[in-house]
Image (cartoon, rainbow, N blue to C red):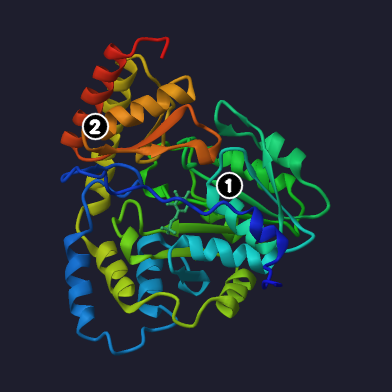
Amino acid sequence: MTLPQPRPSILSIEPYVGGESKIPGVNRVVKLSSNEGAFGPPPGAVEAMAAAAREMHRYPDGGATALRRAIGARFGLDPERIVCGNGSDELIQHLILAYGGEGTELVMSAHGFIMYDISGRYAGCRVIKAPERNLTADVDAMLAAVGPRTKLVFLANPNNPTGAMLPAAEVARLRNGLREDILLVLDAAYAEYVTDPAYDPGVALVEAGTNTVMTRTFSKIFGLGGARLGWAYAPAPVADILNRVRGPFNVNAAALAAGIAALAEPGWVERSVAHNEAWRARLAEGLRAAGITVHPSHGNFVLADFGTPARAKAADAALRGRGLIVRAMGAYGLPQALRITVGQAEECGMVIEALSAFMRDAPSHG
Ligand SMILES: *Cc1c(COP(=O)(O)O)cnc(C)c1O
């Protein structure tokens, strides 16, 4: 029997495993596995989605005009160069399918966001992972990984899962070292959380040329992961390509309404950033005090390094025993680590307590 066969590169994809949300036999779990904001969805967005439900027989505005205007007004950007997507993942995939493909190469950093790898293989690209330094993207290594077939370079800044951030000057150095025909995609999913003045999400580079794109999301600080809403800020020719290939109604009506309302929620971002700054620091301190290595993070999560895969696994089991779900990092080549989202104050306290007890009970040989 001859089965229909996909293109060979597709068989090399390991399916994406999302953060778990259930533990068998446990009623109340604390989900700290997907970097969803600490405060749930903005109340105004919930109301907007309920109102939108009554109009659900209507197709959405395929051009996302009102949302693009709201994003443009909020971030000081030209709405004409904003393209909205069904999560930023969708836009990442379209960029790779449109600019990559068989016979081309995509360069990312060793522990970069895994969707670049998955979508790259889907498109048929050879995915090249440049080594990092101290779990931080290394511009020189990325430039060295570029070859004549390279069409795309991806940088998550800050990066998930490491939390590392490259200052604007380093990102500019990356851009300046790339050929003009290479598309640089700056994935700024955590941009709103960053408080370091050396950071820039990439707007200036997008506007300075025709070959850099910035992607953003409503899934993290805006608490709308379930609505699937992301956006790209792109030079006009790239925005034009995205508008040709995306589904005509790729963003649903509830997501459009929720996004506009989330941007208008008074004080939402300020409160989220203040909470994140304070509790990311306390979480990191608490874990370090317990003897765990915690990498510096610019996002709403920390990467906790337990030294060996076995200890990370045991720590994960100990957390689960208390109803706490975090993210195992084997798929990212970091099996010795767990990624922990900064949740509410009480949730951070629970993690610190659980891992402190774990470290007391399971001394260094584990
Ligand atoms: C969460 C995340 C995304 C995905 O965002 P969606 O808009 O939900 O698709 C993209 N990039 C990075 C680095 C992320 O952590």
The answer to which of 267 and 47 lies nearer the viewer is 47
Which image quadrant shows ligand 1? bottom left
Q: Quadrant of residue 182?
A: bottom right
Q: Position of residue 265 (x, y in %)?
A: 21, 61
Q: Quadrant of residue 111?
A: top right
Q: Kindly report which numbered mark, 1 or 2, lies closer to the viewer in this rendering.
A: 2
Mark earlier in primary sequence (1, 2): 1
The answer to whether any part of residue 32 appears in the image is: yes
Q: Is residue 7 left or right of residue 303?
A: right
Residue underneath mark 1:
155
Mark 1 closeness class: few <14, some 14–19, many ≥20 residues within 10 Å: many
Residue visible at 49% across and 46% down in the picture: 200
Spot the residue most to the right.
148
Q: Is residue 164 left or right of residue 116?
A: left
Q: If the image is split into quadrants, where does the C terminus sit?
A: top left
Q: CA distance from mark 1 to mark 2?
A: 36 Å
Label 2 near label 1: C-beta < 8 Å? no
Residue type highlighted by circle 1: Leu
Q: If the image is split into quadrants, where does the N terminus sit?
A: bottom right
Q: Position of residue 333 (x, y in %)?
A: 56, 35
Q: Position of residue 222 (x, y in %)?
A: 30, 56
Residue underneath mark 2:
321
Q: Is residue 113 left or right of residue 139?
A: left
Mark 2 closeness class: few <14, some 14–19, many ≥20 residues within 10 Å: few
